[in-house]
Image (cartoon, rainbow, N blue to C red):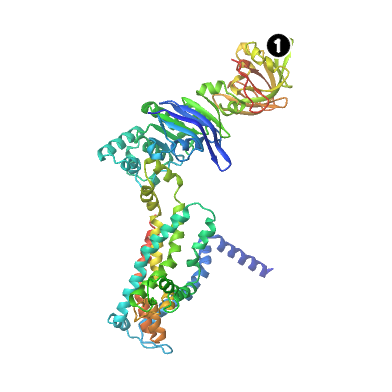
């Protein structure tokens, strides 16, 4: 059980920065997810915590200790790798017992711990097998088992589910959440999958281009993304971004996207006042766009016309790719929506959920709460 | 018109022959099989036949059964030859394997110019044995040896060392040269094995608490065990059947103390023209090599 602190951590590979000026506090027992596209530095950050990479600058603390100079084995951490990294010539039992054996634990305790971990993960029947004889999901469990027998202060996961098929991934996601609940240990988990981040984390850290973009709870990041990148990365389907101009017309603030104009809700207007007359990005999530016919009554007045390009019926909802003027949008509409390709549809937009982002990088979001 | 149909029918059946995997396989194997029959199988069986006769060079002899073989059992030089061969083939292998492993470990580290260095390290293996051994012949020369010269000028010795003239020194010298020639093969083979070990395994072990020595024992050794075994078996087989190195350095001397099967068979069969007896000497290698070859094949087919 321990808190992990990264203090002004940077990592250079030659002239390329993999991680830049990273400050992060992972509280004890927290399930923190580092999420971002490939090459954003999330794995490097994790590997620095593990001791597999040395930070170029900054200090890493695990518990109260600065661990920069400690080798991985003395950091009281366990890590689960993307490719599982099971020792191919050892049985499942020996894989799990290896760390304890190196640490000279008594035989009975090793045995007890391995049995306990294999009970938790449901791999009791696999203990005599070699990794080769296991399926991907089973290997994953063994890799997790090898980490939990150690009872480390911190668990590190490096994209552990990315080699599993979709169904198994959903299942393992739930199991890892349960495991965290049961073990009550600090977990740092790296993924590029925003769904894993949203569903498992108690705190998520969004990274891009070696920089931390935002740290927050999953819902906090989802509802109040700091910039256009985070808004687009978190949430599925992706938030719609439409270049627009903010206008002040008859004392009301409006969004002008050429093909359509929408009034900014009065609640938000004061925050956006300063933007009047300038360009920005209008952001709206697909699930905040309705088929006007099935929209709640109070949303019906803010509607736009669009032509349907693609219809994706998912059973529980329908995704529509539409064109409004020269803008492409995705809308998540009611299953009763009856529309054909190339037809026009009226879409109601919940403007209380809208975001505005600055036109120029880093495209900061204008806070409106 | 008639001939055209015949032609196209012929073309069609040829195509069918090439399309079917079973017949295509046989067709593709034929050239190789022919070469093997002409250059390996025929001489081998001829050798067996010769060993059962009292042939001498230039004159086909009569069938005498296993007399050539039984005669050899009472031949003290043959005993010594067998002993020398075992020493030569078996004593050198652990050294080659160990030094080769060390070399592989050094080479597996990423460093500047690692590719040219790796290529350079292969030199003893690539240069024709006859050529490199001539170099060693000079290095070990009783009069002009640079080793003797160096040790003498350092005051370590007073007289030149007679590397190839003293029985113990001679067998040690040929073993040394054999080890020198064999290290790169082990080195490069083991290097390939080392590079097949995923980095993640070492990282996982490092986190599990393994220091460099533990990782070597628990990760590196088990993963390269297979290639080391294969390299060792191949090396034993090749060394057993060696000829050039010894022939150039000592021709089996002094006083037969470095004779191995190959050189002794040559001496009896060609120099002394007793080709039947020579064939028998060479064929004594056969059961021993067969055992190693079968072990090798069994290991390779294990999975």
Q: Nearer the viewer, residue A300 or B112?
A: B112
Compared to residue A134, the image places residue A245 above or below, namely above
Q: Secondary structure at mark 1?
A: strand
- Visible residue check, residue A200: no
Q: Position of residue B39 (x, y in %)?
A: 48, 75
Compared to residue A260, the image places residue B273 above or below, namely below
Q: Which residue is label 1 attached to?
A: A252
Compared to residue A190, the image places residue A365 above or below, namely above
Q: Nearer the viewer, residue A20 or B291?
A: A20
Quadrant (top left, top right, bottom left, bottom right) of the N terminus of chain B: bottom right
Say left or right for A20 vs B159: right
Q: Give the residue drawn at x 52%, y 59%.
A: B117
Q: Give the residue drawn at x 47%, y 38%.
A: A47
* Crowding at mark 1 (Cα within 10 Å: few <14, some 14-19, many 20+): few
Q: Position of residue A127 (x, y in %)?
A: 33, 41
Quadrant (top left, top right, bottom left, bottom right) of the C terminus of chain B: bottom left
Say left or right for B203 vs A263: left
Which chain letter matches label 1?
Answer: A
Compared to residue B276, the image places residue A272 above or below, namely above
Say which quarter of the image contains residue A238.
Answer: top right
Q: Nearer the viewer, residue A346 or B222?
A: B222
Q: Position of residue A221 (x, y in %)?
A: 54, 23
Q: Position of residue A324 (x, y in %)?
A: 70, 24
Say left or right for B203 vs A272: left
Say which quarter of the image contains residue B168.
Answer: bottom left
Say which quarter of the image contains residue B249.
Answer: bottom left
Q: Give the residue drawn at x 43%, y 74%.
A: B149
- Visible residue check, residue B276: yes
Q: Nearer the viewer, residue A22 or A118?
A: A22
């Amino acid at each position: 059980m321990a808190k992990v602190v990264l203090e002004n951590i940077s990592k250079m590979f030659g002239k390329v920065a993999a991680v830049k000026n990273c400050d992060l506090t992972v509280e004890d027992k927290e399930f923190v997810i580092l999420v971002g596209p490939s090459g954003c530095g999330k794995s490097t950050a994790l590997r620095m915590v593990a001791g597999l990479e040395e930070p170029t600058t900054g200090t890493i603390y695990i518990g109260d200790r600065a661990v920069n100079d400690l080798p991985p084995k003395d950091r009281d951490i366990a890590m689960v790798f993307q490719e599982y990294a099971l020792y191919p010539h050892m049985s499942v039992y020996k894989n799990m017992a290896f760390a304890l054996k190196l640490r000279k634990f008594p035989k009975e305790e090793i045995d007890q711990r391995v049995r306990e971990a294999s009970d938790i993960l449901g791999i009791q029947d696999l203990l005599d097998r070699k990794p080769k004889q296991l399926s991907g999901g089973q290997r994953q469990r063994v890799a997790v088992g090898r980490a939990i027998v150690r009872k480390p202060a911190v668990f590190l996961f490096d994209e552990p589910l990315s080699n599993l098929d979709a169904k198994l991934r959903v299942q393992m996601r739930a199991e890892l959440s349960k495991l965290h609940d049961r073990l009550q240990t600090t977990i740092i988990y790296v993924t590029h999958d925003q769904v894993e981040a949203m569903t498992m984390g108690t705190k998520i850290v969004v990274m891009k281009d070696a920089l931390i973009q935002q740290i927050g709870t999953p819902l906090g990041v989802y509802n109040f993304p700091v910039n256009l990148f985070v808004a687009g990365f978190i949430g599925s389907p992706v938030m719609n971004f439409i270049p627009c101009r903010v206008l002040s017309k008859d004392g009301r603030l409006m969004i002008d996207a050429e093909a359509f104009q929408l009034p900014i809700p009065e609640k938000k207007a004061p925050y956006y006042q300063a933007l009047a007359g300038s360009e920005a990005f209008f952001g709206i999530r697909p699930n905040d766009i309705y088929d006007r016919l099935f929209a709640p009554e109070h949303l019906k007045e803010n509607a736009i016309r669009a032509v349907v390009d693609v219809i994706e019926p998912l059973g529980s909802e329908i995704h529509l790719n539409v064109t409004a003027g020269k803008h492409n949008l995705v809308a998540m509409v009611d299953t009763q929506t009856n529309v054909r390709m190339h037809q026009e549809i009226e879409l109601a937009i919940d403007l209380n959920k809208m975001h505005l982002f600055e036109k120029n990088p880093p495209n900061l979001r204008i806070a409106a709460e | 018109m008639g001939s055209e149909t015949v032609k196209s029918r012929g073309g069609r059946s040829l195509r069918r022959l090439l399309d079917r995997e079973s017949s295509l396989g046989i067709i593709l194997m034929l050239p190789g099989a022919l070469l093997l029959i002409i250059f390996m199988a025929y001489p081998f069986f001829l050798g067996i036949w010769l060993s059962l006769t009292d042939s001498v060079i230039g004159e086909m002899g009569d069938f005498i059964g296993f007399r050539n073989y039984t005669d050899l059992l009472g031949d003290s030089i043959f005993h010594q030859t067998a002993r020398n061969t075992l020493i030569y083939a078996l004593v050198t292998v652990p050294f080659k394997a160990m030094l080769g492993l060390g070399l592989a470990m050094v080479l597996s580290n990423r460093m500047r110019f690692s590719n040219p260095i790796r290529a350079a390290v292969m030199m003893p293996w690539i240069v024709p044995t006859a050529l490199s051994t001539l170099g060693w012949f000079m290095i070990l020369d009783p009069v002009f040896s640079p080793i003797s010269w160096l040790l003498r000028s350092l005051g370590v010795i007073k007289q030149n060392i007679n590397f190839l003239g003293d029985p113990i020194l001679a067998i040690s010298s040929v073993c040394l040269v054999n080890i020198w020639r064999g290290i790169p093969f082990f080195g490069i083979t083991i290097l390939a094995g080392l590079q097949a070990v995923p980095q993640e395994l070492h990282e996982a072990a490092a986190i599990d608490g393994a220091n460099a020595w533990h990782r070597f024992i628990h990760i590196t050794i088990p993963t390269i065990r297979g290639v080391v075994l294969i390299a060792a078996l191949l090396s034993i087989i090749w060394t057993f059947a060696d000829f050039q190195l010894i022939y150039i350095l000592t021709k089996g001397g002094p006083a037969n103390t470095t004779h191995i099967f190959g050189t002794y068979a040559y001496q009896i069969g060609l120099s002394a023209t007793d080709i039947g007896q020579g064939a028998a000497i060479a064929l004594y290698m056969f059961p021993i090599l067969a055992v190693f070859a079968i072990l090798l094949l069994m290991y390779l087919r294990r999975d």
